[in-house]
Image (tube, helix red, strand yellow):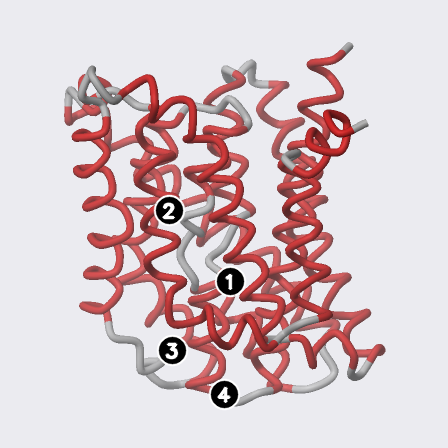
Amino acid sequence: MQQWASKIILNRNFILVLAVVLGLLIPNGAHWLKDYTFYILALVMTFSTTGISTKAMFPLKEMIVPMLMASFLNYIVFGAVIISLSYWLMPTPELFLGFVVIAATPAGVAVIPFTHILGGDLKYAIVGVLGAFISSVFFAPLVIGLFTDSDGGINSMHLFIMMVKLVLLPLLISRLLLWKPILPVVVRVRGRIVDWGFALLIFTAVGLNRHVFFSNFDVLFWVSLVLFVSIFVLGWLYELFCWKLAISAPVAVAQNLLLTIKSSGFAVVTALSLFGTEAAIPSAVMAVFVLMYLLYLSIRKEYFKAK
């Protein structure tokens, strides 16, 4: 019985669902954790990238295609779908602008650890996230300015520095963790650190936006509908597209995550800063939908693995 309970408690999906539930029930902890989310994410990134060897980053010319593809999927494809849907379905301009901010947001760094979890091409994911962050310097002001008649007030240098801190520095530090004497320990604890670290981030995101989930249910319905189509339906269609073109499964996994997973934290902060509380509702709800989609992909992988 004890072994069975321990197995459930340490299960990745249980941990992430528990993070959502606790975020709704005890949001005060999220306000305490919010100042540490950067460090938690950096830790998750560091351990998740130990799954890629230094040799896999070369030759450099092979990085160009993943970077361009990630930017195309993240901004052009996803952006076109979510902006079109929200333009027709959102009842207020503020909610629509909230979705414009999501379209302008770079890929979430969760793409990298979950590419590792789902057995995808980790190198492709790292390079793709890097490309999406670099592209955000140009795409974010362009997309927001197009729909607000302004430059959007986004600090491009801040985005670049954030990309360096959350992608490049953890990648460099992870090279030290590949030192042979400590590598067996790193491999043994890597999964738990990634799972629990990501759970803490989910708990914080949900807790900080708890009020959203107990407010206007009509708004939540339409916001949820747009996000469901933009994440679940679009992700399923892209998987079908990859299958039709016989794209390798590891690359397809990385591309699908680069297409559907946006940085919820970036979107929430940007929407609040530029357009106010109402505009941040789509970003807050998106954090839950991203979690649901990642859980869906994870559970589906385990189901087919068990068959």
Q: CA distance from mark 2 to mark 1?
A: 17 Å
Q: Amino acid at mark 2?
A: Ser
- Report the mark closest to the observer, 3 or 2: 2
Q: Are marks 2 and 1 in contact (CB under 8 Å)?
A: no
- The residue under label 2 is 71
In the displayed structure, 242 sits above or below 226; it is above
Q: CA distance from mark 3 to mark 1?
A: 20 Å
Tell me which numbered mark, 3 or 2, is placed earlier along the sequence. Answer: 2
> Residue at 29% across / 45% down in the picture?
131
Q: Quadrant of the C terminus?
A: top right
Q: Secondary structure at mark 3?
A: helix
Tell me which numbered mark, 4 or 2, is placed earlier along the sequence. Answer: 2
Q: Amino acid at mark 1?
A: Ser
- Report the mark closest to the observer, 4 or 2: 4
Q: Secondary structure at mark 1?
A: helix
Q: Are marks 4 and 2 in contact (CB under 8 Å)?
A: no
Q: Position of residue 88 (x, y in %)?
A: 72, 72
Callout 3: 10 Å neighbours few (<14), some, many (20+)? some
Q: CA distance from mark 4 to mark 3?
A: 13 Å
Q: Secondary structure at mark 4?
A: helix
Indicate the quadrant where residue 58 lies.
top left
The image's mark for residue 145 is 3
- The residue under label 4 is 275
Q: CA distance from mark 3 to mark 2?
A: 18 Å
